[in-house]
Amino acid sequence: MKGKILLAEDEISLGEIIKESLDSRGFLVEHVACGKKAIEVFKSFSPDIVVLDIMMPHKDGFEVSREIRMLDRNVPIIFLTAKNRTQDVIDGFENGANDFIKKPFSMEELIVRINSHLRISKINFEQQWVSIGKYKFNFEHQILDLHGKETTLTYKESLLLNELIKKRNQVLDRSYILNLVWGTDDFFSARSMDVFITKIRKYLKDDPLIKIVNIRGIGYKLVV
């Protein structure tokens, strides 16, 4: 499989033609016909790239793109639309798009652009990994990897681990991390952070050379 594509196109016949053409070239395509469904499928399907029409029922392509960008800052988004004013193109890019293809279009052009964005996305994804002992961590995608076994972290877990990594072998100030992740350094947030630290220790338990040390009254230190 070359990649997973979310195609949001409300013209059913055109959407099916595009889907069949992409399927035949080794892509896995989910086709939806409205903006609301596009968001639902994006969350469950986790596509590698999104192809959006602008004029769709319930939510237009601009709104869908904005919502996708709140969920994923990196997935490539291509607008595929009959709207061809300069302002439409500007609006597309300002709402999170990576590319803009005007109808009518050729399938070969669409495929070339999809492949180009997937290559760029793959390079960026590979550059986002940092090593922690035996582990690799990708903050943008919230993934901790041990020899190909991936653990998906929550956003707060990822943010906390990322700060520990940036200050590896140094003390991470308790008040700083509480305000960054929880927005306050009160008692309840501090107890919550202790729970999160325990979770991260469990995630890293398969490398005995990694430790998260509690520096009482000051903060935590990731020792690698």
Image: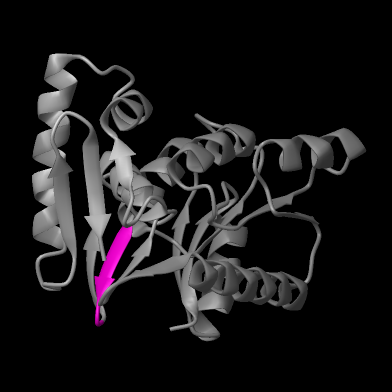
> In x, y percent, where is residue 145?
27, 71
Left or right of 16, for residue 157? left
Q: Quadrant of residue 13?
A: bottom right
- Please report the residue visible at 21 percent of the width from the left and 63 percent of the height from the top: 151
Left or right of 206, for residue 183? right
Q: Does residue 216 show up magenta in the picture?
A: no
Q: Quadrant of the N terminus?
A: bottom left
> In x, y percent, where is residue 18?
60, 68
> In x, y percent, where is residue 121?
58, 67
Compared with 169, 206 (above or below) is: below
Left or right of 211, for residue 130? right
In the image, 71 versus 7, the foreground residue is 71
Q: Quadrant of residue 142?
A: bottom left
Query: Which region shows up in magenta?
Result: 143-147
Q: Among all residues in the image, which is located at the extreme right? A: 86
Q: Quadrant of the C terminus?
A: bottom left
Query: Which colour assignment does the render follow?
Result: one colour
Compared with 56, 180 (above or below) is: above
